[in-house]
Amino acid sequence: MEGESDPLLEKPWSVQRSQGHGTFHSSSQRSSATDIYFHSEDEDDSLREISRLPEVSLLATMKRYVKECCNVHDAKKKFPIIKWLPKYSFLDAQGDIISGLTVAMTVLPQGLAYAVVAGLPLQYGLYSAFMGCFVYTILGTSKDITLGPTAIMSLMTATFATSPRENDPTYALSLTLICGVVQALMGLLHLGIMVNFISYPVINAFTSAAAITIAFGQVKGVLGLRDIPKDFLEQVYETCRKIPETRVWDLTMGLSSIVILILMMQLRKIKWHQPGPNERIPMPVLMFRKFVWLSSIGANAILVVITAGIAAILDVHGHGDAVSTIGEVQAGLPPFKPPSFSSDYYDTQTNTTVHLDAGDIFSHIGTGIIVVPILGLVEAIAIGRAFARQNNYRIEPNQELIAIGIANIMSSFVSSYPVTGSFSRTAVNSQSGVRTPMGGMVTGGIIILSLLFLTPLFKYIPQPALAAIIIVAVVQMIDYEIILNFWKIEKLAFVPWGVTFLVSFGLGLEYGILVGIGVHLMILLYPVARPKITAKYLDYVVITFNQSIRYPSVEYLQNKVQQYMYKNQDAGGPPMSVILDCQHLTTSLDYTTMMASCFIYLYHGLIEIIADFKRKDVHFSMAGCKKSIIKELKHADIKDIIFGDTIEDAIKKIHEAEQHGSFEDQLESITIIKGRLAGATAVNATPVPSRRLPRLSPNGGLETSPEMPAPAPATRIARLSPVRVPETNLAISEESDSDDEGKFGSPDQDKTLRM
């Protein structure tokens, strides 16, 4: 090893071994580190190599690590803004400002409406709409995605983070911080692949069920009903029961708002005449088209302004209670502080003040700690990939996880509930001509200005108008056509879809998605546990399977092998030797597949199959095995497998084994009763077939039966075929009654023969 250098420390060192003992000396004179000596106790044992590590400055090591990890390339990956900001142009700014203003017109009414879904005061919907935009501008890799409150995240907040105290945001803010930490860790650990295990049928069913739940939850706002419970089934019952209490003005405004929104949304679908190469669109026509498009994009904001104006006019004329309004909205920006993981509320049943600490909050959130972050990631990454394909660029999934996670962490400091990418606002952003993520800065700035100056006007916004905005937004998420596609393309996909959909209504959305994921994973893993196995009868049975053997399929494979080894099992014919066609066995075997003695998996595996074959006096062969698999089987000490390069080669080797014997197991013990050899056992506790038993010779040794080959010369214990006696002690235990005592010694005496 002399002359080599350490790749990290770059200091030469060498190892010298002295005669007699394992003493090692350093050849480097530049370090003052102490030499290390190792003295072996046994001169016959191999000396262990040991080296002296020179002392290195901790500061130098840290500098080297920082230099290797914190370079410009890595900085651009972690902070994508470094890539596009130096190239930022006036045209980019123009497109980003227009799209940012347009998205702000959409998120202002949606934020107020989604706060109602989340069960929080209305200002928290706006608190959730600006910080994510700022963070994503710096860390995000998609120019189109806008972060903020969404229908799904609002519903999940109401499901998992509802405080026992009315209008208390403590649980929601804690959930935001938890989501951010989980999402950021998943990004740093490159665990974005976990999202791929949530299949499209499960996500689609969950989204449809959530959309129906949210939409029906807003029916009470359209009808002007009060005191409706949050549980879906109870909500349906109470809403139907209280229909006679409907407020006419609320119903009129709610239905009118729904119709107006639907009609204005259709304006986006107008296909205008496209001019030819030499044709110019007149400026008035172009301005009219822009006005129609802008009206369709800002339909929610226009509706809020119109209905709020109507409510204000009614209030001026003394009819302020004719239409239900949202009331006062707290003005100003939220304080910048971390979430409080404690809360107090007054329990009316016990008339005492109850204190809740962090443990109580985590316990209440429960599975939301995992479900909510994963749903946020699924929603954001799905949106990002869709618009990246549409606009011909790529996103980095793990960087997206980091961006969304840090956005949630920072948002929790400004009183936000969990945020993620919004499909509707991302579509508006893309259609508005956004050029870079800087459009999010404009949107966030407009939200902050609205919180500072416009909140006094929000008190006139009617509740039926907000309910209509939510209903129209979420109804588009219901995908009923997918059922027909499943039926035409893959009927099995309908199973997880239906289970998720029904359980979401029966037990709740949080259980619906978990059960759906479990069902689809079972469907995914079923072929692993039940591979397709076929049998072909040649000279022997050739069994073929379509995939590698894993422990869930071991018992199934074992049963099939035992079934197919009889050509006509009902007729009670003799068993046949089996050849396992291993052409599809492309990966290594796991331990359970190889070892039947593994208690964890109930003794399944190849050893048990082989033991059963030996009892039936037939052979087991594996044809076409890769060398790596054969090596694993040999390392696992599995004997008596006949390996063939091809099926024909395996047939040939089985023929030879039947003629000459080829079992490699060794006799462990034989039993003598009344002077006769009654039985023998191999080292793996497998009984030796009776027709292969040797006979006891008069001189106390063993000899083979007449049908077996003659014993090897000069040996007292003969070589058996197909059972071989090893060159080790062979215990011969004698069992006799009182009449035979003394023929081979006392009953308690064992006779041991050596080769």
Image (spheres, rainbow, N blue to C red):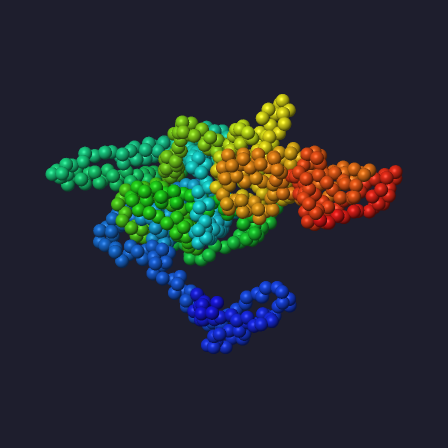
* Towards the viewer: 162 or 396: 396
Residue visible at 60% across and 30% down in the picture: 576
In this rendered view, identify the residue nearer to me: 3 or 477: 3
- Residue 521, given in percent of the width and then of the height, sits at 50, 38
- Left or right of 694 in this view: 532: left
Numbered label tally: 0
Rendered position, 402 above or below 37? above
Q: Nearer the viewer, residue 325 or 685?
A: 685
On the image, which quarter does residue 674 sit in? top right
Seen as rendered, the residue at the extreme right is: 739
Q: Is residue 626 left or right of residue 710?
A: left
Q: Is residue 393 visible?
A: yes
The front one of 374 and 357 is 374
x and y, in percent, of residue 592 in the image: 58, 43
Give the residue drawn at x 35%, y 33%. 258
Q: Residue furthest top?
A: 571
Q: Position of residue 489 (x, y in %)?
A: 40, 29
Name the side, left or right, on which 703 lies relative to 507: right
Q: Is residue 575 placed above or below 111 in the rendered structure?
A: above
